[in-house]
Amino acid sequence: MQAAPDAASPAALGAPAKQAWPAKADQVLGLLVEIPAAILVVAEVVVLFSGIVARYVFHRPLIWSDELASTLFLWLAMLGAVIALRRGEHMRMTALIARLGPAKRDFFDTLGVVAGLGFLVLIAAPAFEWALEESFVVTPAMEISAAWRASAFPIGVGLMIAFSLIRLLSRTNLAQAPLALGLVAVLMVVLWLLGPTLKTLGNLNLVVFFVGIVGASVFAGVPIVFSFALATFGYLALTTRVPTMTLVGRMDEGMSHLILLAVPLFVFLGLLIEMAGMAKAMVRFLASLLGHVRGGLSYVLIGAMYLVSGISGSKAADMAAVAPALFPEMKQRGAKPGDLVALLSATGAQTETIPPSIVLITIGSVTGVSIAALFTGGLVPGLVLAIGLCFVVARRYRTDDLSGVTRASGSEILKSFVVALPALALPFLIRAAVVEGVSTATEVSTIGIVYSVIVGLLVYRQFDWRRLGTILVDTASLSGAILIIIGAASAMAWGLTQSGFSRTLVDLMTHLPGGAVGFMAVSIVAFIVLGSVLEGIPAIVLFGPLLFPIAKLVGIHEVHYAMVVVLAMGLGLFAPPFGVGYYAACAIGKVNPDEGIRPILAYMLALLVGLIAVAAVPWFSIGFL
């Protein structure tokens, strides 16, 4: 241990001042971003809910509501991405670098910040040019300049540059910064010098940029959004004549589709139901029904994740709502921590198709498949996988000692049911509002939000106003991290399509041996791998527009195919050693990841069997359409 410098020494006087100003700048600038972002979440809820009321109650639609919501949405997405960068919450694959020593891990953490900064500096000028071009467009309903909306992009990029510099100064190892900066600069210069040679390679550039650069960046721990964006920028700038401003336009188009506004709203709804006590009420009701049987609380965990997923649409919110309510009692009954996080992780994969899944919303956005049909088709596949998990639980806990467990009486069950009824009604309310045409799939989340606020205030009386600001900022951060990945993946998918790659892929996939069966089998393997490396949303944005038309061409129903690929991605996302979802479950359960790897194998096998059953029997997905 090094001795602390003397209080009167120059080092003691200078070091705190040197370290304090970046922290102060981070704090002040952070508030200037977080407060508007929180206000924007509330504004979106008010605008969309007002549209529902005006249209359905007063029969006088607000013709400007969608346009205003879309304008605010890009600002919410960009400010949310800024907050996520400030907090270090952008999605990245750390399975490999986590195994390195502290010094090497610090270097790759710094490299991730520097790589992101490199892209942001490169895109700053094109982002400003794009906003300037948009200033000549006038919106049809509100008749204002589109620059009010488009300026969100260059301002967001500028703020991310500022926070990246602050992170380099205050949160990374400064000794590693020059090396990381030098490495990124050298790579950029080398690629620029190779530009004339790269132009002669034709479609081999797809391998160089979208396999080589993306793969190296992802495995080096660079955030996925910057891995995609850097590769796409390099491909367009060095191998084509397409202006780099096009990249900004494609990112905007991908991340600001009005359907995707459901993402922040459902994330907010998921956090609200946990705060309002609704998730806890559902868990207690299920525990009163099944808590007395062997493995009963494990069944409760499976059922609770199924129900909560039908409300929140966010896997992190699902697990965070259920685990704290069940894990303490399960540990008291002798369950091992590793088994608990293994089951929690498995249920995360099992419930990926339960509406209103954000992945399903994304599929609807990028492929044109009806979101209402996807919501209907997702219920039974999740149930099929739940049955598989229940078989594993029954076998694993068949020797449980229940001598100290008291069975709930009929009156206790009835009481817990009455208490849980307002919470249990929410999934049915959400589905009915969409099916009956009261609201769109985007708007319906606002009905759930208003309902949750009322129930939390008047029924459960657990609505904590002090937490509301934190929840709004968390919503913006998670949503921004998701939406900017969708934007980067959309731009990358556009680049692949323009290269002619889509035609090559169609020709290859349509001539696979086995026809529809062969295509489905290859898709399952591919999306398990993609889910473990890229996570579900960027994978579906990249390959959904390419593969869904092929599925239709070979005779597979698009909803059936959607269920299979979503479950396959979920399997990869929650399976160790690469699955990010598995490590999220360990973090929520506060368990060392090593403890859950062996117990999760049986659960993953059950999920794989269930996935094959869903793929083999289309009725599970389309029987109720």
Image (cartoon, rainbow, N blue to C red):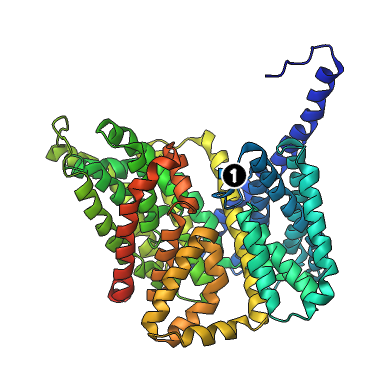
Q: Nearer the viewer, residue 115 or 212?
A: 212
Q: Position of residue 400 (x, y in %)?
A: 18, 38
Horizontal side of 288 relative to 473 (left or right) equals: left
Element type where label 1 sits in the image: helix
User: Would residue 551 be visible to someone looking at this image?
Assistant: yes
Q: Quadrant of residue 329?
A: top left
Q: Nearer the viewer, residue 402 or 81?
A: 402
Near mark 1 (Cα within 10 A), the count class, few <14, some 14-19 or many ≥20, is many
Horizontal side of 77 relative to 529 (left or right) equals: right
Q: Is residue 358 above or below residue 503?
A: above
Q: What residue appears at the point 54 percent right and 76 percent down from the top-left corner?
A: 545
Q: Is residue 219 above or below residue 98?
A: below
Q: Nearer the viewer, residue 550 or 207?
A: 207
**Amino acid type, callout 1:** Val
Where does label 1 land, which residue?
473
Horizontal side of 617 relative to 499 (left or right) equals: left
Q: What residue appears at the point 64 percent right and 76 percent down from the top-left corner?
A: 496
Q: Quadrant of residue 45?
A: bottom right
User: Would residue 144 be visible to someone looking at this image?
Assistant: no
Q: Position of residue 512 (x, y in %)?
A: 44, 84
Q: Position of residue 176 (x, y in %)?
A: 75, 41
Q: Quadrant of residue 408?
A: top left
Q: Quadrant of the C terminus?
A: bottom left
Q: Position of residue 144 (x, y in %)?
A: 75, 67
Q: Quadrant of the N terminus?
A: top right
Q: Nearer the viewer, residue 120 or 524?
A: 524
The number of callouts visible is: 1
